[in-house]
Image: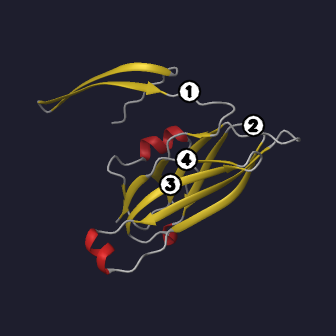
Amino acid sequence: GLLQLSVPPGPYDLGLDVDSAGVLGKIREAVIVPMFSLVELDLSSLVLAPIDHDASLPDRETALRGMPVDLSFRSGVPLASYLEIYGLGLDRGNRARYLVRYTFAPLKSAFARLFGGSARPVVFEFERGSEFSSAGERLVIEPDKLAAGRYRVTVAVTDLTRNVKSESVALDITIR
């Protein structure tokens, strides 16, 4: 299952030992848990998870539990995204305004890149508002919007108050 820890921002030494049916594994590495700024635009990790057709938008913990390790999703199932935005500027009315752009760019094999045409990315773009300098961004992508295939997913956020942009780390996913 999913192992979750809540720790304050800072540097840590990660040590994890696993025993799975007699097969041992271990990880030892230094990790840094970031502190998100209240004044500089920054994005959390993007979380993608399948949801039931009748389900409500999941919170971060529910989305994390539902996110497949191999980032492979079944075709015909809605996909929910979750992202946290920090450091949004506030206008004179103490509101943050921002533009969110989700891009699902098709990934092609080397053969297809050499001999095939270029497929266009699937893009969802919205203007949003918040009463705070941080916001949770959630979206449900209906199954008819993404065909089966491999995609590189990114989310770009533009703070409309200060005209500053930030982009998430890309996730490569498969819809089967």
Give the SS element for disc 1. loop
Give the SS element for disc 4. strand
Residue at 34% x, 46% y is 69
Q: Earlier in the sequence, mark 2 or mark 1?
A: 1
- The residue pinned by badge 1 equals 35
Residue 11, percent from left and from top: 44, 20
Crowdedness of circle 4 by 10 Å Cα count: few (<14), some, many (20+)?
Answer: many
Residue at 84% x, 38% y is 94
* Mark 2 touches mark 3? (CB < 8 Å): no
Cα gap from disc 1 to disc 4, whole angstroms:
19 Å
Q: Earlier in the sequence, mark 2 or mark 3?
A: 2
- The residue pinned by badge 4 equals 82
Q: Which amino acid type corresponds to the residue marked 4 in the rendered image?
A: Tyr
Residue at 49% x, 61% y is 78
- The residue pinned by badge 3 equals 154
Tell whether 117 sits left or right of 58: left
Q: Earlier in the sequence, mark 1 or mark 3?
A: 1
Give the SS element for disc 3. strand
Q: Which amino acid type corresponds to the residue marked 2 in the rendered image?
A: Phe
Q: Which amino acid type corresponds to the residue marked 3 in the rendered image?
A: Thr
